[in-house]
Image: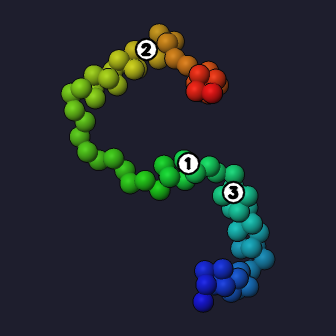
Amino acid sequence: MTAKEKLRRAIEELSEAEAADALELIPRRSQRDALEELLDSAPADDEPTTPEEDEGARESREQIARGELFTAEEIKRGIA
């Protein structure tokens, strides 16, 4: 039995309320992009950071505090 066949069978067993809840998930799922999917399914990073990484993060936070940052739109224009 294919995954779609299993899904159809499971849907038939749902109550009306459960079906309504399931319907709410489908549009949200289709609105997600591939990167968001990948990041959500990635394992948590549990490796310790290096002193160099800690320094880079500290510098980045200071730049943000000073307002030295780019908006997503500015980055997109720079890439295009």
Tell me the number on the disc at residue 30. 3
Q: Residue furthest bottom?
A: 1
Q: Is residue 80 left or right of residue 38?
A: right
Mark number displayed over residue 63? 2
Q: With respect to residue 16, does 26 lie above or below?
A: above
* Direction from residue 20 to residue 7 in the image, left or right: left
Q: Amino acid at mark 2?
A: Gln
Three-letter code, disc 1:
Glu
Mark 2 nearby-residue class (10 Å; few <14, some 14–19, many ≥20): few
Q: Which of the marked residues, 2 or 1, is nearer the chain's N terminus?
A: 1
Location of mark 1 (residue):
36
Residue at image point 54% right, 47% down: 35
Contact check, label 2 and label 1, Cβ < 8 Å: no
The percent coordinates of residue 48 (x first, y second) are 23, 40
Q: Secondary structure at mark 2?
A: helix
> Is residue 10 in view?
no
